[in-house]
Amino acid sequence: MMSRLLTRKYKKWLTPLVLVPVVALTACSGDDGHDGEDGEPGDINISISSAQSLKAEIEKVTIDDALQVSFEFYLSNVNGVAVSGLADLDSIQTLGAGIAKLGDQQRRIRPLNEADSASVQSTAETDLSPQWTSYINNVVEPGEVADNDLEPGWDKNKGTQWQASIESTCKEACIEAIGNGLYRYTFSQSLDSYSNIDGINTEYVAENIHRVYLELLPYSGATIDTMLVNTTFDFDPQTGTAAADADSRVLLASEQSCYRCHTADLSAENSLLMHGSKRFDYEGCVMCHTSYSGDPETGASIGMASVVHKIHKSDYLVIGYKGSVHDYSDLSYPGDMHQCQQCHIEDAAPQADFYQYPGQETCLSCHEKYAPEGWNGTAVGLFHDRDAFPDAWAMSCSGCHPDSNNPLGSAIFHNAAVSVTDALAEQYQFAITDSVIDELQDTLTATLTFNQLSANPDVDPAIDNLWIVASGNAQQTVMPENNGQRKVWDIVSGADDITMTRDGSVVTIIVKNAGVADFDLDSVGTLYAKVMACGDKSTGLVASCDAQDTDSNIVVAEVPADSAVALTANVSAYAELVNNQKCAACHDDQFQQRVNDAHSKISTPGNGATCGACHSPQVATTLADGSCQSCHTNDMVKYMNATRKHTPGDASVKAFRTISNSLGYRELVHSLHANTRTTVGYSGSEREDMTYPAAANDCQACHDEGQLTMDTLSAQSSVIVATPNATMTGEVAEYSPTVAVCAACHNNEASWAAHAQSYGGVFQQDASSGAIYQPGDESCHTCHGEGKGFGIDVMHGFN
C-alpha cells in the first residue's frame, strides 16, 4: 500500500502544472525547506464543489471479528487529481453501498407463498457456476400498480418475493475522510445483522470471494455523465485485497457486448442508466439482480440473465418503483437470440464460458414457454422430461450440464447453427481476383480464388448457389426499360450462357449475352459474388443441400467474397459509406438470411409470384457494400409500385410511399433507426415499430470518420415519392437527394425546408409534371459536410 500511495502522491504533484489555469487547486502546507533547499511538497487536491468529473477506485476492504465491513476508496477527477471535501458535504445526493459473496446458487421459489415451496426448490446438484448472494435482502409484497391497462392474467403469478438490495440511506453518517482524496465507507450494520431470510444463505464464509459496490453522486445538480460513480471491487476477505481474476465471476465485457448496440454515453437519451439515473455498471447490477430475486406483482424473475434474455426476446413485464409498468413486448432485437456468443463473447471476460453452466432462471427465461400443463415451476421439472428434450438426453446429463464428455453443456445446441456457419465460411472463403467486361462480345469474365476447393461448384452437393452480381451506375438519369443496371447469375444453374472452368482452387466464369450496354459504365460499376453452402448443425460438417427442405438440422450459410471489386478496369467499385462491422455488431452475421426471408415473402400484385423469384434479394452480400443499394435506389418506388413489370412510372407510386416510407436505401435505413418510418408495409398491412438502442443522431454508430463528407450526394438524382397525406396513387412529390436523407429523420421539414431550398434543395415539389432538380444543384455539403464549420459531425454533436 505504501508504494501505491507514493505513486499517487507523485502523480498529483505533476498534474497541477496543467490544471492550474483551469481549476482552483489546494496545496496543504508542507515543509517549506530552509537554506535555499526544496521542502517536502504538500498534498494537491481539488475541492468536490470545483470538480468537473469524478472517478473512484476501491483499494482495500476490512471485515473485523464482529463482521463489521468497511472499505477505502480513492476519489479523483479523470486526470487523477485527488478530490477533497466529500465527507464535509451537508447532504450527499446519492451514496449507496452493497456487499455480496460468491458461492452456491440460491434458488428462487416460484412462487414463494405456495405450500409446496419446498419441492419447488429442488434441483440437480451439477451446477458448477458460483453466483452472487447479497447480504442485504428484503421480503417484498405485491403493491398497487399505477397503470393497470394490461392484458388479463398478467398478475396470475403474483406473490411474496425476495429481492437483493444495497444500503442507500446512511450516506454522510457512514463516510469519513482519512487522507488526501482517500475515504472510508463503513456499512451501517455488521454482516450478521441484516435481515436473515429463511431460504437465503447469508452466512459469512471468509474463504469465499466477496464484492463491494459503491455508487456516488455528490450533490444535486452534479452532471451525471461525468460525476456519477458506479464501481465494484472483488476481494479476498482474508486479506482485504483484490481477488485474482480467475477466482471471481465476470461473464461479460460490457464494451464488447452491451455497448456494441447500446451507447456508453450516460447523457444520451437511450443510455443504460437505470433506477432513477443512479446505476449503469453491469457488475454492480448483478449484485441485486441475483438468481433468487423476483418481482412480487408479476412473479417474474429479476435475475440478470432472465432480465436480459427476456427483454431482448420482447417477452418481459415487471412492475417497478411506485407501481410503474415496464412492458418490453414492443422491443425489437435485431440479432439471433439463439446465438449465445452475440453477447457471451469467447475470452472477452475471465468467466466468459460460464454461460454454458445451466442456471434455473437462466434456462427458464427462454424455455418456460414450452412447459407442459401441470409443470411444477422448476428447471428440473421441465428439462428432465426426456421426450421433450431427446437430443440433450441422448448425451445423458452432459446434454445440459458441462462435463469432460461435453464441456459446452447445453451451449452445444444453442451455438450449433453458428458453429456450422463459421465452419462453412472458413471452408468456402474466396475472393474475386479479376473482372473483365468485353463490350464488343457482350461478355463478363470473373475469376474467383477459393482458399480450398476440391470439386467444381456445380457438382459439390454442399453448394446450393454460387451467385455473381454485376451492378452498374445505380443513379442513372434515364434508366433502361428493364432496369438492367443490376444483373444476377447463378453459376451452378447450368444456364447455356454460362461457362465455368476450374484450375485447383481458381474458378473462371464467362457469362455470354451479359447485357453490358445496360450498365452505364461511365464511372461506377461493381461485381459481387456469394456462395450459399449447406451444413448439418448436429454434426458441424458440410451436408448435401438436397435435404434442406426435409431436415431441420440443415443450415444454409452465406459466404460472400472477401470484398466487391470494380466491374472493369475503367470504372470504380461502389464506395462504402457505412462500416459493415458496425452493422453486424448489432445485427449479427445471420441478419442477411433474415433479410432474404423477408424479401421472399413479398408477393407481386396480380400473379402471386414473389419478388425474389426475379430480383434474387438473397444475393446481397453485406449491408454496406452497395449490394442492397443496387436495388434500393432513389427510383425504387417507381419500379416496386409499377402497374406493369419493369416499367417505372411516377403515376404508379402508391399513396403510402411517402418520404417516411421510401424504399431508397439511405432513407429506408435512417427512418428505421430513427423510428420515424410509417408502419404501412408493402401490401398495405401494418408492421411493428422498431426500437433503436442508441441515439439516432450518433452517426458514428454506423459511419466511420470521412464517410460523411457528402461530396457526391448532390450529384445524384432526386427522390420521387408520394406526397405527404396523399390519398390516391400517383400523387407524387420530389425531394433533392440531401433533403431526402435529412427528411428521413428530421420529419419536421417545415422548420428547415426554406433553408435547404435557398441552397438549391428541392422539398416536396409537385412532381406530377416531372422532376425539376438537376444533379449538382444542391450546395448543402459546402457547410454541412463532415469537417466543415457546420458539418454534420458538429450539428449532431459527435465530433
Image (cartoon, helix red, strand yellow):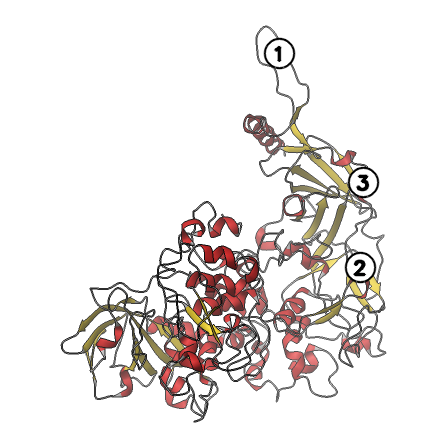
Which picture quadrant has residue 469?
bottom left
Q: In what element is the residue under mark 1? A: loop
Above or below for 628 versus 287: below
Pointer 2 or 3: first along the chain: 3
Q: Position of residue 567 (x, y in %)?
A: 25, 69
Is 289 on the left or on the right of 689, as rendered? right
Which picture quadrant has residue 28?
top right
The residue at 34%/61% (across/down) is: 575
Above or below for 776 versus 116: above
Q: Foreground residue, 590 or 627?
A: 627
| Amino acid residing under circle 3 | Ser
Q: In what element is the residue under mark 2? A: strand
- Mark on residue 137? 2
Kindly report the distance in space between the C-alpha atoms of the residues bearing marks 2 and 3.
26 Å
Q: Position of residue 340 (x, y in %)?
A: 54, 70
Pointer 1 or 2: first along the chain: 1
Q: Which residue is mark 3?
A: 91
Q: Position of residue 245 (x, y in %)?
A: 58, 52
- Mark on residue 541? none
Q: Which residue is mark 1?
A: 33
> How many dots with numbers?
3
Above or below for 238 versus 398: above
